[in-house]
Image (tube, helix red, strand yellow):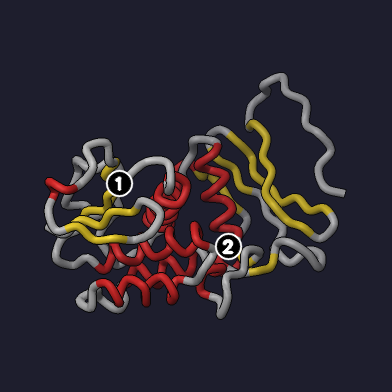
Amino acid sequence: MLTWIIPNKLAKAAYDDIVPANAKSILVAAEYPEMDFRIVDEPIVSDEQLDQVMRAIMTVYQTMGKTPLVIRCQQGRSRSVAIACAAAALYDRTTYGEEHKKLRCCDETVLPQSAIEVAVRLLVPRIFSDAYNEELTTWRELLITDFMWNQESWSNIESMTLTREQLDNAFNCSWGGIHGSPFTVWTKKRVYFPACYDGSEWIESVSRHPDGNATEHIGG
């Protein structure tokens, strides 16, 4: 079994005995239920599966440099590579293509692409630009990130006004006015909606049920 280790950069280890004892195994296939994090087999077809892929990417990205990470994969390791390259691109503020090229230089047997790469392109469009574009995002990406902070997931959604096209439309969220579609998302615990100030867009949410907390003025 090959093991991908990600301290700050991608590196390859051939045997489990050289994996750091305190490493966190985070991924990578439904065949490994003992992993700390799992994703389903490709093809990625449902919103719940996309949610899992995004959580995997963000788990790698947010933990880099803090905890030794191990990405485990079987013979069809293109899924692991797609997740690892996406996380590395976010961490290094580079593109998916640049990180994949670095990886291919270390191991020419790395598979060129995976069905998960299509899902990754949908989730984090900023790393598929000609150059890293920090401001390029989608409502799906921002929603999943907010869900993570609020300990929710895509399966918690009870109603949503966004169409799939609106959900996955890439836009610049940092300047130039409002580009993202208006929306409301109701989950079991919260209500999510867009906010904007001085051309910068993001997502806010409030408890779906009375919690005694006042809501600050949002936007401007």
Residue 157, x across and y down, in percent: 51, 45
Quadrant position of the N terminus in the picture: bottom left
Q: Amino acid at mark 2?
A: Leu
Q: Which mark is residue 52?
A: none
187 over 92 or under it: above or below: above
Q: Quadrant of residue 86?
A: bottom left
Residue designated by label 1: 26
Circle 2 crowding by C-alpha within 10 Å: few under 14, some 14–19, many from 20: some
- What SS does tag 1 mark? strand
Residue 169, x across and y down, in percent: 60, 69
Left or right, residue 179 beside residue 17: right
Task: Give the residue at x 42% y 41%.
Answer: 66
Left or right, residue 59 beside residue 41: right
79 and 159: which is toward the camera = 79
Task: Give the residue at x 49% y 71%.
Answer: 95
Q: Amino acid at mark 1?
A: Ile
Task: Give the residue at x 24% y 61%.
Answer: 12
2 and 17: which is toward the camera = 17
Across the whole image, how many numbered discs are drawn on residues? 2
Circle 1 crowding by C-alpha within 10 Å: few under 14, some 14–19, many from 20: some
Task: Give the residue at x 28% y 64%.
Answer: 79
87 and 171: which is toward the camera = 87
- What distance separates the C-alpha of mark 2 from that of mark 1? 27 Å
209 over 165 or under it: above or below: above
The single residue placed furthest to the right in the displayed view is 220
- What SS does tag 2 mark? helix
Residue 42, x across and y down, in percent: 27, 65
Left or right, residue 102 beside residue 136: left
208 and 11: which is toward the camera = 11
70 over 22 or under it: above or below: below
Q: Earlier in the sequence, mark 2 or mark 1?
A: 1
Residue designated by label 2: 167
